Image (cartoon, rainbow, N blue to C red):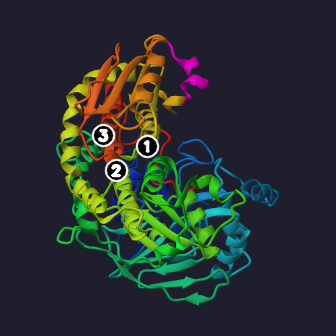
Amino acid sequence: MCGIVGITGKKQVTSEILNSLKRLEYRGYDSAGIATLNNDQINEVKCEGRVDVLEKNLLKLDINGNVGIGHVRWATHGAPSDINAHPHSSKEVSVVHNGIIENSMLLKKDLLKKGYNFKSQTDTEVIVHLMSEYLKRYKIKNAVMKMLNSLQGSYALGMIFKDHPNIIIGARRGSPLAVGYGPGENYLGSDSYALKSMTNKISYLNDGEFCIINNDQVEFFDEQGAKINKKILTLSSDEKKYDKGDYKHFMAKEIDEQPNVIKNCVNEYVDKINNEINIFNFPWNEKDIKNIILIGCGTAYHSCLVAKYWFEELTDLEVSVDIASEFRYRKNRLKKETLYIFLSQSGETADTYAALDLCKKNGMKTCAIVNVIESSIARDSDFVLPIYCGPEIGVASTKAFLAQLLVLYILTLKLSFLKKNIDEQTYKQKIKDLKNLHSQVEKTLLLENKINSIANIFSDAKGCMFLGRGSSFPIALEGALKLKELSYVHAEGYPAGEMKHGPLALIEDGMPVVVLAPKDSYYKKTISNMQEVIARGAKVLLVTNKSEDDVFSENIWETIEVELSNSDLIPILLTIPLQKLAYYSALKKGFDIDKPRNLAKSVTVE
């Protein structure tokens, strides 16, 4: 979601902050800004729109300085506008903020009585005036502590001060924040990716902590103001420049990268010599795991739903799935014999992190499946299973979703074998099927031209449906989500058997309906449900898998056949045409495919 960059050094920092903001554009944002200290005053430039608009505005003004902060904003309080963009500044202090201040209206009411004027509609501006107020009465460290203690909600903050021209102060509660170290300068960032172009030496703030940074020193403090030491981590330095290459959009590239993602992930987890899944370092005995709860948001939640079918089919474990944003607000009866598995591409999803935090505070078993191993969710989990999919820039997740599914399936197989729920022969055969999966995905991608030719029907539709049964049902949900995210077409996913319990009322003549019907145990029932929607005028796109059996049905508008595979892995193959369908539907409408409206890549607010 929002992104923060701060630099304090001995040279001009504006261009470096700007370059770091460009790295954060993938997160999704609606405005951008920079503030620096120069000639004993705070100077800021900010605007609604993209970082390239900010860059043009910066060329007109000289706001160079040795200390500065920058921000890309995703609106929470106040519509996207020049005024609501960050930083927010007074004469004394300038602030950038990720998160939400839940008591901002109460604080604002009190500050208005004291004569402070508000220019924006944001919750962040209360931090500026609170800080200005406390600086009248306290030295800077105590003023920061008083201000932080006044806030309710979540925040990652970067602050610079007119009367303290060499420092940046950072603070964290709920939203991630990192500190970077360099020769003659130090950095603040919303994540390591924001800082990676400048340094590979990183420390992370934990909840309640704050830091004071100058060009040659970083001090960390806990909530009580006691000084604490921080471990300095070295990030991998083998990062290659990730760009679109010959592709028009990152999403198109990321869809086509999926065969390699699967191949790399299988290589990481499967010992080729012994034909064995090399997850050996469980921190618990598998006999102590009786239940599994899978927790995620959005696309990650859909991967959890698919995995529930796998765990139930292949193990004797009781399995449930939770939406992270609901999990910690229910009266959860946390159990020691339950393994809580948290899925997040970024590893910084606020709702998922909050659910993890609840489990950790109660001493539960926790496992993270993430793409960023330096992330908050990875660092705070007992056990981490990386998905090894590389950078994913497109806001609508594609290759990360497939990698999440793959790692969940690999974990299912391993636990199933350890618990003796499947025999060795079955286990070895399923591992063999895994090794062939990348080539099946590669062949399925060859359906691109056919999908492109039918995408007009979906891009022009008033609404459409995606239907599936069994493990195909969550893929129907994911297909509908992708179409909504990219082409802004109203789309719903349903279990095919539920059509007659209400959704049939929505079917109109010519309405596009995607039916996911692989040749599995649900096949005949799904085909019967398909006939119900065809009889009411729906234009059905059947997505199935290759087989010697013919589809015994009439009046199907179009059929797409993915490759034949182990039935467990069919959900992965069914996903490919739905990703392409959403992509081409949006492309025909001329939308910004990598940055859909109103959405963010890394959702760091609850």
User: Residue at label 3?
Assistant: 576
Of residue 519 and residue 331, the one placed in the foreground of this image is 519
Q: What residue type is labelled 2?
A: Leu
User: Which numbered marker is on residue 402?
Assistant: 2
Q: Could you say where residue 537 lies in the image, as x and y percent from the top left?
A: 45, 11
User: Going 40% across and 67% down the picture, which residue do you hit?
Assistant: 420
Q: Could you say where residue 297 lies in the image, as x and y percent from the top left?
A: 52, 51
Q: Which amino acid does label 3 sit on?
A: Ile
Q: What element carries label 3?
A: helix
Which badge, 3 or 1, is on the more N-terminal residue? 1
User: Which numbered marker is on residue 471?
Assistant: 1
Magenta segment: 498-508
Q: Distance between the residues labelled 3 and 1?
A: 15 Å
Q: What residue type is labelled 1?
A: Ser
Of residue 516 and residue 529, the one placed in the foreground of this image is 529
The answer to whether 368 appears left or right of 133 in the picture is left
